[in-house]
Image (cartoon, rainbow, N blue to C red):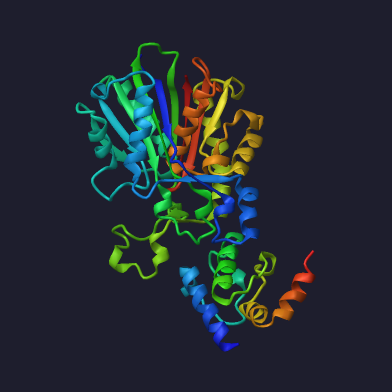
Amino acid sequence: MKRALIVSTGSYLPGNIIPNEDLLQFSREAQSLIGKKTGVLARRHAGENQCTSDLALAAARTCLGKIDFLPEDIEGIILSTSSPDRIQPATATRVQHLLGAKRSFAFDINSVCSGSVYGLHLADALVKSGQYGNILFVAAEVYSRFLNKKDFSTFPYFGDGAGAVLLQSTEDSSRGILHSCLATDGSSSETICVPGGGTMMPYEKITNPRLAYFRMKGEDVLSFTLDKGPEIIRQVVAAAEINLDDVKCFICHQANINILHGIAADLGVPSERFYVNLDRYGNTASASVLIALDEAREEGVIDAGDIVVTAAFGGGLSWGANLIRI
Amino acid sequence: MADTLKKLKTGIEDLFPEVERIVVSGETRLGDIPDFDSMAAVNLQTFIEENFKVAIPLDLLGDDTTLKDIVDLIENPGRLAAAEKQRP
């Protein structure tokens, strides 16, 4: 049986570091709440001339460069983003062109913050089908462009960044993406959204500029993630017929340290086995899991043969998990 | 009083687009405003500081605070100072 093995990872974070203390639009009292409520101490923002595909391209180049993989050998590119360069065409097409991946198809997916686990499952399925020998999956986000700088319920918690993984076909059935579980509850689509700018509310019908910005109902998101996070992790672990103790590292969407601790407590797993980088980058939406996966590999937190669970949750509402043997 | 309340109401209508579902008056509690929570309180605090040059601590912008209470704090620095002294 064919498996999709992660043969390389990469990430890119813009150099513009913004600590909480630099968010001068908020009072000192409010600034001190950011770290307490979420664990976020700083975030990165893309440069003025950088767009989502630029971040994706940098992460993809790092990923390919680590194993000297030639762009012209890529067979497919999937890009997850909920902050695309433009409404159309797909952001992935610019990445394909600038990367020089001439043989590759390229398209976008948007499952908001869950895009990482959705994309991993999709790339895995394409490789397992036997039709493609490899897929480059990239997740890139530039949320700073559509956050309201004065909105304390969103602006301080998000950052820009990109991650990439190269999946390659292997006959070794013991390694690769072993199982994935995805779920959606479209009845809660208003919980996390950008109301204006699409066909439901075209630009000319936006009556309040705030409707063109990202918004979320923080308390609803918190209860959703604490409910569905542990559930989907248990589900993917059970489907693979292993135990939580077999998992070396849990790489979850980096939204809030209290969510990660809450999921760990629910599962009865020490929180030290949950990878954390949200203190440095904030919530980078669908890019967060791939950035964390790359850093965990680079830091030696996970190594070949280790079992890793990736899990993410976000707008839709959507959530999911992958169980991977590195 | 009337001008301050009017300006405050305009700000609240801008901060909370969903507020059009209710009638906003001086008696309106912040907790009555759709989507008002502790995060939104910071947005209101920022709006007040920018527009009235008055820094109201977050614990004085709770669910039970009315718009009239806020107008009082904006227009009477002495009351704001007294309220701050009573904070735990």
Q: Nearer the viewer, residue A235 or B71?
A: B71
Count of numbered circles in the view: 0
Q: Position of residue A301 (x, y in %)?
A: 56, 23
Quadrant of residue A12 in the image?
A: top left
Q: Quarter holding the C terminus of chain B?
A: bottom right
Quadrant of residue A100 in the image?
A: top left
Q: Does residue A228 sit above or below A32 in this rendering?
A: above
Q: Nearer the viewer, residue B1 or A252?
A: B1
Residue B57 falls left or right of residue A205: right
Q: Does residue B77 sit above or below A292 in this rendering?
A: below
Q: Residue furthest top?
A: A172
Q: Quarter holding the N terminus of chain B?
A: bottom right
Q: Does residue B45 sit above or below B2 in this rendering?
A: above
Q: Does residue A55 sit above or below A221 in this rendering?
A: above
Q: Residue furthest left?
A: A102
Asked if one can make out residue A2 in the rendered structure from this viewpoint, the answer is: no
Asked if one can make out residue A235 in the rendered structure from this viewpoint, the answer is: yes
Q: Position of residue A160 (x, y in %)?
A: 44, 44
Residue A159 falls left or right of residue A31: left
> Residue at 40% of width from left, 63% of height from top?
A211
> Residue at 67% of width from left, 71% of height from top?
B64
